[in-house]
Amino acid sequence: MKINPDILTTSDIYKLLTGVVVPRPIAWVTTMSPTGIVNLAPFSAFTFVSSAPPMVGINIGLRGGDLKDTARNIEAMGEYVVNIGDETMMEAVHRSAIDYHPSISEPEILGLKTVPSDVIRTPRLRDVPISLECRLSRTVEFGEPGTRFIAGQILMFHIRDGLCSDNKIDARMLRPICRLGGPNYARLGEIVSMQHVGDVVTGPR
């Protein structure tokens, strides 16, 4: 099969790409509006972009031609928190994607507790295994729909006790949620350990 993207609609390409780029981690982002409303939304176009300084990035598209609450709040306040949920929170993550009015606080609607962050004003989710307090570094627009790639510097890591040893996260204990295409999610599944690449012989000595 061959598919020419030039003949597809933006919606069709989105469906195709989200089925190709799998599994994806989910950034469960808390932001705060200038009036103090705490917003929560999931984004699976999410990755880290730098380790010095530590930075992560999320892609946020438009909704109906307008900025989503998350992007609008980040641009207004210059900060946000990336929360990482575990598999017990899958339903709450999915429901937080509902398009609520900006005056509605998703954590309140979903019964999710928040606690103050250490460095920024935006609160983080209390019961997630990992939260990253971030300060906006830069925003880059891509494509015709005005999709924004938002990169932020991590100012503070919050990691559940017992989950991290020697600065390494135990993925089996983390039990992250994996995003697939459509309304589909997955658990981590089997972990296969390989040799460190530095220990692998790649050619004749």
Image: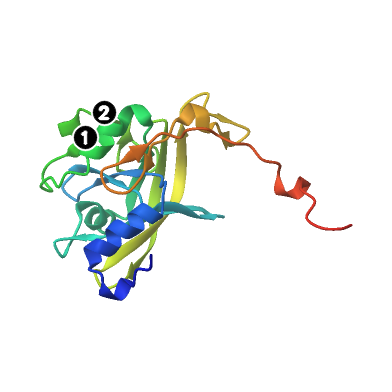
Q: Within the image, what quadrant is residue 138 found in?
A: bottom left
Q: Position of residue 163 (x, y in %)?
A: 52, 28
Task: Give, as a three-letter code, the residue at label 2.
Answer: Lys
Are circles 2 and 1 on residues that touch, CB within 8 Å? yes
Along the viewing direction, whichever of 196 and 6 lies nearer the viewer = 6
Q: Position of residue 100 (x, y in %)?
A: 12, 45
Q: Which residue is drawn at 32% across and 69% down?
A: 141
Looking at the rendered image, the quarter that the N terminus falls into is bottom left
Separation of marks 2 and 1 at Cα, in angstroms: 7 Å
User: Which residue, given by chain and number where applicable, does mark 2 sit on?
Assistant: 113
The secondary structure type at the circle numbered 2 is loop
| Residue 120 seen in this snapshot | no
Task: Give, as a three-letter code, the residue at label 1.
Answer: Pro
Q: Which residue is drawn at 20% across and 37% down?
A: 95
Q: Within the image, what quadrant is residue 119 found in?
A: top left
Looking at the rendered image, the quarter that the C terminus falls into is bottom right
Position above or below: 156 against 72: above
Along the viewing direction, whichever of 98 and 106 lies nearer the viewer = 98
| Residue 158 seen in this snapshot | yes
The answer to whether residue 2 is left or right of residue 71 is right
Q: Which of marks 2 and 1 is nearer the N terminus?
A: 1
Q: Where is residue 81 in the image (x, y as percent from the top left)?
A: 35, 44
The answer to whether residue 92 is left or right of residue 51 is left
Question: Can you tell which mark lies on residue 107?
Answer: 1
Q: Residue furthest front?
A: 1
Q: Position of residue 134 (x, y in %)?
A: 40, 48
The secondary structure type at the circle numbered 1 is helix
Q: Residue at x 25, y 52 (%)?
A: 70
